[in-house]
Image (cartoon, grey):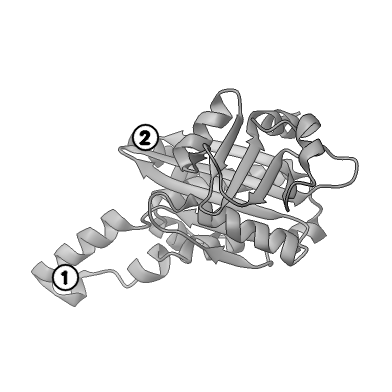
Amino acid sequence: MFDPATDAAESGNGPHFDCTLAAVQSLAVGPAELIGLRGRVSTQFAGQLSVGVIKQLEEQSVLALLTLKQAIEQSGLTVEELDRCGLIACARTPGRKRIGDSLVKFRDSGAWSMSPHVIPYLSLHSLPGLLSQGLRLHGPNIGVGGLPGSESEAVWAAMALLHGDQLPGVFVVLTGWNEDVCQCVTLCLQRVASADIPKMRFRPGHGGDARPLTLESLRAAIESDGSGNWELGGASLAMRLHEARLEAAA
């Protein structure tokens, strides 16, 4: 288990990258609750997103907008810093159901029965673009993954932006369906200042007995003791999620 106090003594054993978790947000809802959440998005983003845009949003995008807004409010970043922050969004099979329905319409009634908005609103990079526009983030934004089990790609990309491009912060947004529950986890990563205790450690190399990183395992860690070790395919990740969430909410 990741313990910053004891793990610091091992810092010389191979390269590692420490982060502060400035914000941790988690949300999971069923189909009935999603109707109300879309209304919240219409209210909270009335000045940034038009009614036509909000109408086209997939359910995963609705949750992502709300959790990212909360994460930004808790991050402590200034307006100038937010303007330069990076964004990594990993949506699990985005638009799968809507695209499937559209293909049936195309087969039965031809091209004129399909909406032209299917591709721009439901492709892999639609979510990070939407989030950047809705929350006025002007740093790099990237869509990664797209399939179950690809959450680790979001962490790899976030570490590259945070430590390689020296950004003030990187938001990582993970979304996906688990049966009839739509879920989202949003993290705000910042580099560790000299006086800070790291809440996250990324270490290249084999993850040992760590469990695979999934959206479900992250949510479980947030809702329980909040500590965990994950394997990222060529790297390991250790986080103290619950502690970071309590500090951000204080």
Under mark 1, the amino acid is Phe
C-beta proximity under 8 Å, tags 2 and 1: no
Q: Which residue is mark 2?
A: 30
Residue 194 image offset from top left, x and y in percent: 90, 45
Name the N-terminal-most of marks 2 and 1.
2
Tell me where residue 100 sits by quadrant.
bottom left
Residue in the image at 59% along x and 46% along y: 236
Q: Report the quarter where the N terminus lies.
A: top right
> In the drawing, what numbered circle is on residue 127?
none
Alpha carbons under labels 2 and 1: distance apart? 29 Å
- Which residue corresponds to mark 1? 106
Residue 112 in percent (x, y) is at: 20, 75
Helix, strand or loop status at disc 1: helix
The residue type indicated by label 2 comes to Gly
At 75% across and 35% down in the image, what residue appears?
Answer: 7
Residue 151: image location, x then y, percent: 49, 51
Q: Secondary structure at mark 2?
A: loop
